[in-house]
Image: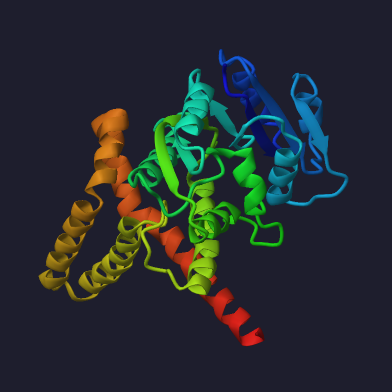
Amino acid sequence: MFTRVSVVIPNYNGGATIGTCLQALFSSPYPPFEVIVVDDRSTDNSVKIIEQFPGRLVRFEQHKGASKARNTGAANSSGQVLFFIDADCVVQEETLLHVADAYEKHRDSVVGGSYTPVAFDDTFFSTFQSVFVHYSELKNPEPDYVASHAMVMSRELFQKSGGFPEDFMPILEDVEFSHRLKRSGVKLLMDDRILVRHIFNYDLEKSFRNAFRKSKHWTVYSLTNRDLLADSGTASVELKFTLFAACLSWILLIGFIVSFDPFFIACLIVLNIMTLVISRGLIRAFFRTKGCSFGIRAALYYSLLYPLAVAAGVAVGALLYLQSRRRA
């Protein structure tokens, strides 16, 4: 007897990706599963695409957010196990089989998967992000949180949990959800077999924008919860040190340009060696995924440029947090 899997997908203007997402799901050889897509009042052609597939479509009359969409999808499910993914995620051939197996082994836990190392759209910036997320989310068998782009849990446990927070930030609702469940005694686990290929469509601008947006909201959330220095998925200790080192590196570089003092260069070299040592696991993942050329470019981007967008997000997030404290 196979476990029935309910795949829950929130969709908001996902016309560019939802067809690929659903095509992969309905090509899955795993027998008993259902797909519930909750459309969050899309204004593009999403609904027309979704209606071409045999899954269940629930439509909102007003835009209500991803949390409400996921909660509604779960409420309309009939499987023993829920598998939450996003409209820009593409399951692998064996993904649903691994989802069912994870449920059977860990019925009282929340099990997370991640992205494949190589993105669906295999460009430099997309695959950089995919490797970064894959490594960061899977490095700890018992993580700080489980991301909703590949989250597995029993429907019974989800009903007891109260669901995703519907009056929350634009993102990080899965982090709040995970932390709330951990505080109640539920174990969070990672399973590196549960993988989805993510459609990023990133270029430099989109990569920077994503880093800025996520770090902004992470900073507000982390300051509120007083865990700013925690090793938490993509908000890892490695990234936080890299952020500090990159900012200091630019200061040292400016100091050398102004003074031509070799002391600044010596400090710069030592600092960047420390960054490579502390982030060696991620650096190895860059090289392992696509070879030497990609590895070198990804390591340089991660250590020198990517932190600039993160730093800008942290600064804005800190200001937003301070403003909220003053209003309170």
Residue at 51%, 33% in the rendered image: 103
Up/down of 188 relative to 25, above or below: below
Q: Is residue 230 left or right of residue 174?
A: left
Scheme of image coloration: rainbow
One can see residue 120 in this view: no
The answer to which image quadrant residue 4 occupies is top right
Instruction: Please give the name of the residue rendered at 78% of the width and 52% of the height, measured from the top-left corner.
Output: 64
Of the pair 42 and 9, the residue shown nearer to us: 9
Q: Residue furthest right?
A: 61
Residue 150, x across and y down, in percent: 53, 38
Residue 144 appears left or right of 46: left
Place of residue 56 in the rendered image (x, y in percent of width and height, measured from the top left): 77, 27
Image location of residue 24, percent across then percent down: 59, 20
On the rendered image, what quadrant is the N terminus found in?
top right
Q: Answer above or below: position of 285 versus 5.
A: below
Residue 175 or residue 281, whichever sits in front: 175
Q: Residue at x 37, y 67 (%)?
A: 229
- The image quadrant that residue 13 belongs to is top right
- Please name the residue shown 34% across and 48% down the image: 301
Quarter of the image with the C terminus in it: bottom right
Q: Is residue 91 visible?
A: yes
Q: Is residue 146 above or below residue 21?
A: below
**Is 163 displayed left or right of 90 in the figure?**
right
